[in-house]
Amino acid sequence: MSLIVQKYGGTSVGSVERIKQVAERVAKFKMLGHQVVVVLSAMSGETNRLIKLAHDVQSQPDARELDVLVSTGEQVTIALLAMALKDLGLKAKSYTGAQVRILTDSSYTKARILNIDEQHLRSDLQAGNVIVVAGFQGVDEHGNITTLGRGGSDTTGVALAAALKADECQIYTDVDGVYTTDPRIVPEARRLKTITFEEMLEMASLGSKVLQIRSVEFAGKYKVKLRVLSSFQEEGEGTLITFEEDDNMEQAIISGIAFNRDEAKITVLGVPDTPGVAYQILGPVADANIDVDMIIQNVGANNTTDFTFTVHRNDYVRTLQMLRDLQAKIGAREVTGDDKIAKVSIVGVGMRSHVGIASSMFKTLAEESINIQMISTSEIKISVVIDEKYLELAVRVLHKAFGLEKAA
Ligand code: ADP
Ligand code: ASP
Ligand code: MG
């Protein structure tokens, strides 16, 4: 007998029929003698609908109340699934995040899980219940409802699997695994049987929304056996996230291509080329709790230099305004920005042992006359910032150039 945590995303619980199908899948695992904990998202579109409602009422919704509101989406699906399971003759109990006591910090809309009270879940499981837990939500030490950031049900699933020392955490979604890139953009994308934890972490952090980055971090920290599968197929092995590089694995140089449309670029032109300038520019940005991603400083000429960095698009206007206010103090000539950019990244542990990957990437983009605005690299990834309008083209040509398509 195994303990399995199954997480189902929005499309997988998008209608009453879909919820009944989830109940049947859960029942199958129960019949095989497994203990099952289910984590659910809200019905697809519901979280967006609730966020829009909040904006209709308050232009900058209060973060605490926003979490009270958006957490309701998951409360609906867990209750419905518990009913569907009971209808099949199973014992089931639904719990909100606060009822389980998924303890988080108090950062509304992006809270982090600190602890999970798993003892009473264990007794429920031992009594033969299927436990159905609301994803994406927790409670802080003062009893306030919190949410874990968009896509956060993945993290609830993996965190519960870690707390319960589950044998496997299965993430059921609308694709049958992790692909070489988003199959919605490149229909020739190929499912990976396995992907290393490090690669998955890069893919998630660089924009592949198939798994929320924090869920991958949890899986790494607690060595949770994590698999991505389709809830629309009866059978299928999906994609397993592995912790060791195995010689027998498909050892491509590049495993996948990720992209992100959520960033914006700020450039501070003509700043004095003196010690302390980077701090003068980025210190206030950090103090305002704004995350900076890529950073480039040009080689100085005539004692001045240009400084460019990217932030989340939601922070673009605020950051631009802040630096314009600081322009005179920094001694900069001009502050400009562009929020029509996209970041495309190639990821693969095989890069460690191969040279010339960056130049192949740049050549491929040059052949399509796609201008590269910024570059950043690590041991297993190369990212470029380009004009947003070339994003899909860039992903497609890179996918082809690195031989990632399905075999014909
Ligand atoms: P869920 O609601 O089940 O959590 P998501 O929409 O969050 O589903 O994640 C699944 C989606 O992730 C897929 O429909 C796909 O478009 C997108 N996606 C992006 N990159 C990848 C990738 N490399 N492999 C598979 N899916 C990807
Ligand atoms: N319902 C939440 C969202 O749409 C959480 C999730 O689906 O993982 O972001
Ligand atoms: Mg998701």
Image (tube, rainbow, N blue to C red):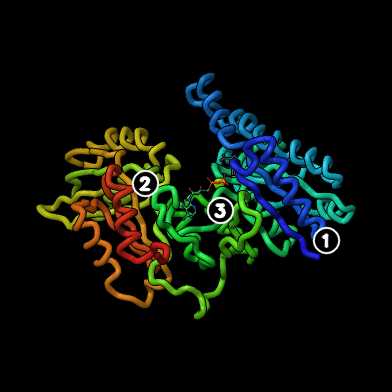
Label 3 is placed on what type of residue?
Arg
* Horizontal side of residue 339 vs 224, given as left or right: left
Neighbours of disc 3 within 10 Å: few (<14), some (14-19), many (20+): many
Q: Position of residue 121 (x, y in %)?
A: 81, 51
Mark 3 or 1, nearer chain start: 1
Residue linked to disc 2: 283
Q: Is residue 139 above or below residue 293?
A: above
Tell which circle, 2 or 3, labels the residue nearer the N-terminal end: 3
Relative vertical location of residue 80 with respect to residue 354 in this rendering, above or below: above
Asked whether residue 4 appears in the rendered view, the answer is yes
How far apart marks 2 and 1 lie (CA) works out to 56 Å
Give residue 63's mark.
none
- To which quarter of the image does residue 354 belong? bottom left
Closer-to-camera residue (227/297):
227
Image quadrant occupied by the N terminus: bottom right
Q: Which residue: 21% across, 62% down?
A: 363
Query: Which residue in the structure is indicated by mark 1?
Result: 33
Mark 1 neighbour class, 10 Å CA radius: few under 14, some 14 to 19, many 20 or more? few
The reply to whether dot 2 and dot 1 touch (C-beta < 8 Å) is no
Task: Provide the residue designation for mark 3.
Answer: 214
Q: Quadrant of ligand 2?
A: top right
Above or below, 298 against 94 in this view is below
Tell us which disc is closer to us: 3 or 1.
1
Is residue 140 at least partly visible in the picture?
A: no
The amino acid pointed to by label 1 is Gly
Vertical relation: 98 (above or below) 354:
above
